[in-house]
Amino acid sequence: MIRALVSPLDWAGASGEFDMTEARSFVPAAGRDWLLPFYDPLLRLLGEERIKETLIEAADIRPGQRVLDLGCGTGTLALMIRERCPEAEVIGLDPDPKALAIARSKAERAGAAVEWRQGFADDLPFEDGSFDRVVSSLVFHHLPPDVVRAALPELRRVLEPGGSVWVLDLSHGGTHGLHGLLARFASHQHGDEDVAGQLPTLMEGAGLLAAEARPCRRTFMGPLVLTHAQAPG
């Protein structure tokens, strides 16, 4: 869970990036670092690709567009987008350097050109109007409500006029179903509110337009909601 800034940034070394883990804490991709080797195999078993296909199809990514995968984790969604939309430019952002290392390794094995960046949703390291699409899968329920409210204006800022944001997430704050059980096993605290249910209102409050949420599908992890909105212009 993202909390307050507590110490200066350090260099990450060979990766050439800032190591933000010394500055801010967050929920790792698998809930705990020791679970990370099991993260991709478990999600494949739970049908991760079928879930993320729904998001990719809805986002309607076109050739030449720039796409930000917010909270990319080990890179599965970003790599799927690159495979299905090879003429799109895809950037994956996550605060977890260990997950990003796995994402880079997967991209190298696949020969996929994806840019991986370390950063946080409420302080995006990009210029205004950098992206045509922002997509996010199973991330927002990890965030405290105050971070969600701070992140949405950032998404609005980095979108091109007329660009859109697409968020696929668990309803009920991710506390129900198998995901809730796994979260308790990993001692992982979620946000206290049903963020998925509030996203349309919060998005419009951040200046995004035509925000809409619709039930997507039921999974072993719990019911999913797909929320989208558009930047003015």
Image (cartoon, rainbow, N blue to C red):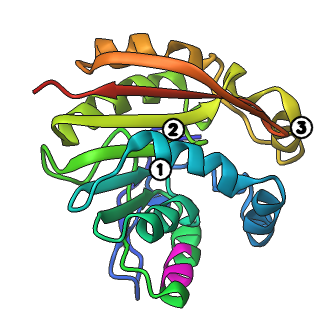
| Disc number for residue 181 | 3
- Which residue lies at the image location 34% right of the left edge and 63% below the top edge? 91
Given residues 76 and 30, the one toward you in this image is: 76
In terms of sequence position, does the residue under pointer 2 or pointer 3 come before the other? 2
Q: Residues within 10 Å of mark 3 (few under 14, many from 20)?
A: some
Q: Is residue 73 left or right of residue 147?
A: right
Q: Are marks 1 and 2 in contact (CB under 8 Å)?
A: yes
User: Looking at the rendering, which quadrant does residue 14 occupy?
Assistant: bottom left
Q: Magenta residues?
A: 103-107
In terms of sequence position, does the residue under pointer 1 or pointer 3 come before the other? 1
Q: Position of residue 10 (x, y in %)?
A: 38, 69
Q: Residues within 10 Å of mark 1 (few under 14, many from 20)?
A: some
The residue carrying mark 1 is 24
Between label 2 and label 3, give the one nearer the viewer.
3
| Disc number for residue 3 | 2
Q: CA–CA distance between discs 2 and 3?
A: 23 Å
Query: How many labels were placed on the picture?
Result: 3
Q: Is residue 112 left or right of residue 207?
A: right
In terms of sequence position, does the residue under pointer 1 or pointer 2 come before the other? 2
Q: CA–CA distance between discs 1 and 2?
A: 6 Å
- Which residue lies at the image location 20% right of the left edge and 62% below the top edge? 64
**SS state under label 2:** loop
Q: Main secondary structure of the magenta part?
A: helix
Q: Position of residue 54 (x, y in %)?
A: 57, 43
